[in-house]
Image (spheres, rainbow, N blue to C red):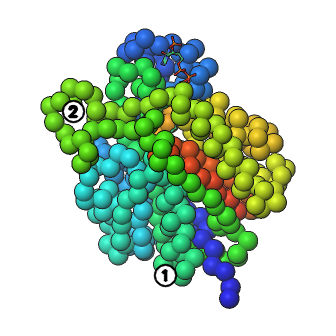
Amino acid sequence: MSTIRAAVTGVGHYAPEKILSNADLEKMVDTTDEWIRTRTGIRERRILENGATSDMCAKAIESLLKHRGISAEEIDIIIVATVTPDMFFPATGCIVQEKIGAKKAWAFDISAACSGFLYALVMGAQFVETGAYKKVVVVGGDKMSSITDYTDRNTCILFGDAAAAVLLEPSEDDSYGLLDYRMYSDGSGGQYLYMKGGGSACPPSHESVDKKYHYIFQDGKAVFKVAVVGMADVSEEIMERNNLTGADVDWLVPHQANLRIIDATASRMGLDASKVMINVDRYGNTTAATIPLCLSEWWLDGRLKRGHRVVLASFGAGYTWGGALLRWSLESPGKKS
Ligand code: UT7
């Protein structure tokens, strides 16, 4: 029996125009550009002033469709990974479906925080690999500014807004596409990174608003300690399972939460910094969007090329984490955008 692999055959992203710089944040909370840069690597992030997560996801998918040269009506499935859905229901996937006119698709959301894109990618690939569907769009999008407390210096310096999408289709050659993955969860980590209010455990009330339960809470130090080990471990595991050394890997695409976590992962993999996709300096942590946003930018400017071996790695709330190995199948578009 021949193997059907799910390959990335399209990619696109959207980042809002408005920039929130470290200098802007210095005027809002007790922080400094120097502290933010040295502790996180972030210089600026994007903020969506008008609209919702679905608007960014729709724009990312429209850009993808334009590059791929197909219409929205050809999409079979839309999977949106997000922790900032437009609303609890209907799914943001259905809202996106309506916005782009993907009339024949079925659509849903998944919630795995910063690992959301990776979880959705692996899930989307199953539909392609079984032969059940041929065109699956996986989009990671988060309007983190909608759940960020801009009076809390512990969190407001970290997050930004963006969306990015990939299209999965059956690979013509089974040496291309999603070759391997390992995904993990550990619910005991839930207490260190969460948004308490709004769900069935703590429905919205005047009290929940007064107590700021509708904002992100993070015990940064606790998350840092496990993220740095979790992301490095899973990346190493992916390399070992596939008999790869640092020399065999063309790109590490890590979740962009903190430059220090990224550096530690690259160093454990024996990878030179020149093989690591990093844009946390320009976008901050865009949660489910970070990994596809890197893929889209690096593909667009020609650095990510057909045949490249790419290791994706993430760590986030849940805890959720994972790693994946892709062999990139899309031809480079060169310098056009
Ligand atoms: O994406 C999902 C997964 N999330 C992550 O991977 C994030 C993991 N955590 C981190 O990236 C880091 O822990 C942070 C960047 C969030 C924080 O860096 P840190 O080096 O762990 O700092 P800290 O929280 O231990 O704080 C050190 C000090 C504290 O002061 P004291 O208690 O030592 O006097 C904080 O109050 O820095 C203070 N601080 C700040 N100072 C200036 C915290 N935030 C700020 C700030 N500006 N924005």
Q: Name the spot of residue 238 as percent of width and height, x first.
A: 71, 56
- Residue at horizontal 42 percent and vertical 70 percent from the top: 77
Q: Which residue in the protein does label 2 denote?
A: 208
Q: Secondary structure at mark 2?
A: helix
Q: Secondary structure at mark 1?
A: loop
Q: Which residue in the protein does label 1 denote?
A: 132
- Residue at horizontal 42 percent and vertical 74 percent from the top: 76
The answer to whether the residue labelled 1 contacts the one labelled 2, judged by CB atoms less than 8 Å apart, is no
Q: Check the image and report above or below for 69 versus 211.
A: below
Q: Name the spot of residue 21 as percent of width and height, x first.
A: 47, 23
Q: Nearer the viewer, residue 236 or 66?
A: 236
Q: Check the image and report above or below for 295 versus 26.
A: below
Q: Quadrant of the N terminus?
A: bottom right
Q: Name the spot of residue 279 as percent of width and height, x first.
A: 59, 37
Which circle's residue, 1 or 2, is located before the other in the chain?
Answer: 1
Question: The residue under label 1 is which amino acid type?
Answer: Ala
- Residue at horizontal 55 percent and vertical 80 percent from the top: 130
Question: The residue under label 2 is which amino acid type?
Answer: Ser
